[in-house]
Amino acid sequence: MFDYGILGNSLITFAIVFVTILVVRWLVMAVFKRWSRKEGKRAKVVPIAKSIVNWLTLYGLLVYTLFHFRSSEWMFQPLFSIGSEPVSVFLILIAVLIILLTSRISSLVRGYIFPGVYKRYELDQGVQFTFDKAFHYIIMVLAVIISLSTVGFELSALTVFAGIVGVGIGFGMQNIASNFISGIILLFERPIKVGDRVIVNDIIGDVQRINMRATVIKTLDNEHIIVPNSYFLEEHVINRSYSDKVMRLVIPVGVAYGSDVQLVKRLLLQVAEDEAGVSPTVRSVPEPFVYFKEFGDSSLNFELFVWISDPTHVIRIKSELNFRIDASFRKHQVEIPFPQRDLHVRSIDSSLTDQWKR
């Protein structure tokens, strides 16, 4: 006969230890919070210490739960079955423990070991992101397989589940599957990568993350656009950083008719040279070039071509060049016209006017 008194005492003991662990964590976190307000070496290690405490608390609670209820029948009673394999609370906790531990190991490796490797071999941000994601996906898949095998779960029992998932993908998850596969292609083929400056639907932004389903792009207005991964393989996307970050910057300028065009050319080239002297982004090679574009309706239209080494500075460099052009033209009295329209009034025959008045 089942002894409910023993069960009650066991639950009380478990609750006391459980609450004690949480209280200790809370006290330790309070100490860390006080340390974080101070400057010095102690404040720098606080984030790492907090992460370790959270890690120890989570896994400590899981391990204690398994140890405390190791003799309880309900821990091993089947909750449900997949195929012919029964699944109990004990098996679920073991699997969760292995997966969580693997996830933590993955985070530690990607956070503390890989950065040193990346720095040593001077890998760019996009390659780093690809390695991080690939390593995490691979190790997590292995963790799931190992956790199921460790607890005695036959992987062949997953065939039924896999068949159900396959039917679901075929009928209702086409977009999710397409975006997931597209995400894998983006990570390895790398038509875009983290850190690239792209133009999507006339919106300029930088690729921040390539997730399993969608890519996050941060715009120049500090807004975030969530774009499905399949979009980058199916639609027209401009990648300003694909193979070479050097790009040509075009500055349109109009001057009044009658202006000295050779003087305008010299002033524009001088502006580009002056900006290159103070901004490392502006390149001297290829050399700046002045293009006499056309005879416009109200002005002689020129374009100043300047090459820059980093597309993320387009707006700032364009603004600086415009400031310099305006100051230079004012100094040398080169007129920048505005659109004008001439109105011609024709005189009317007096006889017709008299007729109209009658």
Image: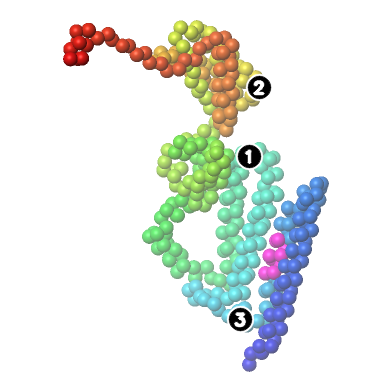
Q: Quadrant of the N terminus?
A: bottom right
Q: Which percent across, then down, holds residue 78?
A: 55, 79
Place of residue 5 in the rendered image (x, y in percent of width and height, measured from the top left): 69, 88
Q: Which residue is mark 1?
A: 123
Q: Which residue is mark 3?
A: 74
Disc 1 is placed on an element classified as loop
Secondary structure mainly formed by the magenta segment: helix
Figure check: 124 above or below 20: above
Residue at image position (45%, 36%) is: 202
Pick whichever of labels 1 and 2 is earlier in the sequence: 1
Out of 69 and 293, give the one closest to the viewer.
293
What's drawn in magenta, residue-wise? 54-62
Give the amino acid type for the residue marked by disc 2 in the picture: Val
Using residue 139 as the reference point, say whether residue 44 is left or right of it.
right
Amino acid type for the residue under numbered disc 1: Leu
Residue placed under numbered mark 2 in the picture: 278
